[in-house]
Image: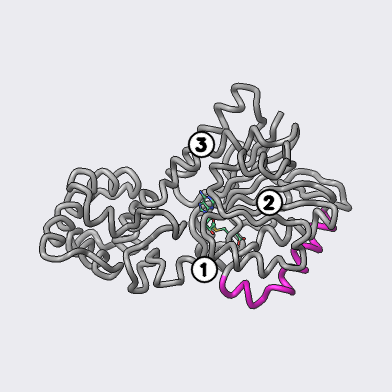
C-alpha cells in the first residue's frame, strides 16, 4: 500500500490546521530549519488526542511541535537527542507544552531504558529523523560542515570521548581507508587515507578546512564533475564513524518496535543509502517475522516542491511500519 492513507476527515482537517499553524508561527525558524517531509510524517504517524509519542531525534523540535499540537494537553511526548545544545533549544521552543514533555539527553538506541525510567510501558508512535540538523551543520565549531572552517570535532554528543580529530590523527592508513570506503562509499578511499597519513606526519590535522584540502588533493582533478563537493563523502564517513551512527540505528529499530503498542507506528527518515538499507532490511525481516506490517513498500520521497524549497530534503527517504 503506497500513497496517502485514507483518514477521517476530522483528522485530516486537524493535520492541515497543524501545518498551517506551524507555517504561521515559525517563519523565522523555517529560515534556519525546515522539518523534512512534515506532512507525510503527520499523515502516517496520525498523532491523535491523548497519544504518547517518542521523538528520538528531537533536534530543534519542529516535528515534535506539530505532534504536540495534535496530541493535545492529555498527550505526552518524550523527546530524545544526543546533543544537549539542541535539546536545550528544543526545550525553549516547546516551553508552552512543557507539562506534556520529557526532554532526555540520550542516544535513541536506549529508547527502551528511557521509557522504563519514565514508567511508560509502550507508546503510540516513534519518529527518527536521522542525521544532523541545520543548527548543527551551520555551527562551524561543531566541525560538521564543509563550508566553514572549524575544529575537527563532528561529535553529536559533546560528552562523547572520541572526535573526528582523534580518528583522523590516530587510526592506521588501513583503518582510515576502510572508514572512508564503508561509510562514505568513496572510490578514492585508499588515496585519501594515504594523503591523510602523509600529511599528519608533518603536523596534526586540526581543522575541517585542512581535512577538506587534503581530500581535494587526494582526488584526481578529473573526478571533480559531480554535483556534490568531492569531500562530501569523506566528511560523511567520519561523522558516521565518530558517532557510530549505523550501529545506533541497527540496535534502535528493534527496541523502538518493541516499545510500540499494537497498531503503534514508527517512521524513519534516512538521508543516505547506508541508513536506508538498514531500515529497509530491518523492517522487512520484522515483517516476515510477523512483528510489523509495512505501510509503504518503497520509501516515500519528498515532493518536488519540498526538494526545491529545502535542498537538504532532497535525499530523504521515509519508511513507516506498524506494530502488529
Ligand atoms: C535532522 S535532526 C532532527 C530534526 C527534528 N526532526 C526537527 O524537526 O527539528 C537530527 C537530530 O537527531 C539527533 N541524533 C542523531 N543521532 C541520534 C541518536 N543516535 N540518538 C539521539 N539523537 C540523535 C541529532 O543530534 C539531531 O539533533
Classified by dominant secondary structure, the portion drawn in magenta counts as helix
Which element carries disc 3, helix, strand or loop? Answer: helix
Residue 135: mark in rendering: 1
| Distance from mark 1 CB to nearest ligand 1 atom below 8 Å | yes
Of discs 2 and 1, which sits in the foreground?
2
Q: Which residue is mark 3?
A: 251
Task: Give SS at disc 2.
Answer: strand
Asked if the stretch drawn in magenta spans residue 17, the answer is yes
Return the residue at label 2.
78
Q: Residue at x 27, y 65 (%)?
A: 212
Q: State whether residue 305 appears in this view.
A: no
CB of mark 3 near ligand 1 (< 8 Å): no
Pointer 2 and pointer 3: residues touching (CB < 8 Å)?
Answer: no
Q: Is residue 5 visible?
A: yes
Residue 216 horizontal/vertical position (percent) = 22, 64
Dots 1, 3 in contact, CB < 8 A: no
247, above or below 104, in the image: above
In primary-sequence order, the first of circles 2 and 3 is 2
Amino acid at each position: 500500500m503506497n500513497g496517502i492513507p485514507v483518514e477521517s476527515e476530522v483528522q485530516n482537517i486537524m493535520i492541515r490546521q497543524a501545518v498551517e499553524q506551524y507555517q504561521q508561527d515559525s517563519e523565522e525558524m523555517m529560515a534556519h530549519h525546515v522539518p523534512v517531509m512534515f506532512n507525510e510524517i503527520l499523515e502516517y504517524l496520525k498523532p491523535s488526542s491523548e497519544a504518547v509519542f517518542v521523538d528520538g531525534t528531537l533536534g530543534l523540535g519542529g516535528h515534535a511541535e506539530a505532534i504536540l499540537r495534535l496530541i493535545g494537553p492529555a498527550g505526552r511526548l518524550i523527546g530524545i537527542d544526543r546533543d544537549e545544545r539542541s535539546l536545550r533549544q528544543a526545550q525553549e521552543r516547546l516551553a508552552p507544552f512543557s507539562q506534556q514533555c520529557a526532554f532526555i539527553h540520550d542516544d535513541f538506541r536506549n529508547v527502551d531504558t528511557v521509557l522504563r525510567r519514565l514508567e511508560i510501558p509502550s507508546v503510540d508512535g516513534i519518529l527518527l529523523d536521522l542525521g544532523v540538523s541545520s543548527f548543527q551543520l551551520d555551527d562551524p565549531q561543531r566541525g560538521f560542515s564543509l563550508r566553514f572552517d572549524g575544529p575537527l570535532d563532528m561529535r553529536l554528543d559533546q560528552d562523547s570521548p572520541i572526535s573526528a580529530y582523534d580518528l583522523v590523527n590516530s587510526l592506521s592508513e588501513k583503518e582510515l581507508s576502510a572508514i572512508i570506503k564503508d561509510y562514505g562509499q568513496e572510490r578514492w578511499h585508499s588515496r585519501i587515507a594515504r594523503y591523510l597519513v602523509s600529511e599528519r606526519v608533518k603536523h596534526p590535522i586540526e581543522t575541517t578546512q585542512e581535512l577538506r584540502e587534503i581530500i581535494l588533493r587526494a582526488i584526481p582533478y578529473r573526478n571533480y564533475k559531480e554535483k556534490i563537493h568531492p569531500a562530501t563523502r569523506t566528511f560523511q564517513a567520519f561523522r558516521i564513524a565518530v558517532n557510530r551512527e549505523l550501529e545506533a540505528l541497527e540496535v534502535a529499530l528493534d527496541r523502538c518496535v518493541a516499545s510500540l503498542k499494537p497498531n503503534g507506528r514508527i517512521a524513519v527518515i534516512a538521508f543516505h543509502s547506508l541508513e536506508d538499507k538498514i531500515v529497509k532490511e530491518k523492517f522487512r525481516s520484522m515483517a516476515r517475522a510477523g512483528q510489523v506490517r509495512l505501510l509503504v513498500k518503497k520509501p516515500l520521497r519528498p515532493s518536488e516542491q519540498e526538494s526545491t524549497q529545502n535542498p537538504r530534503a532532497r535525499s530523504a527517504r521515509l519508511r513507516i511500519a506498524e506494530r502488529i
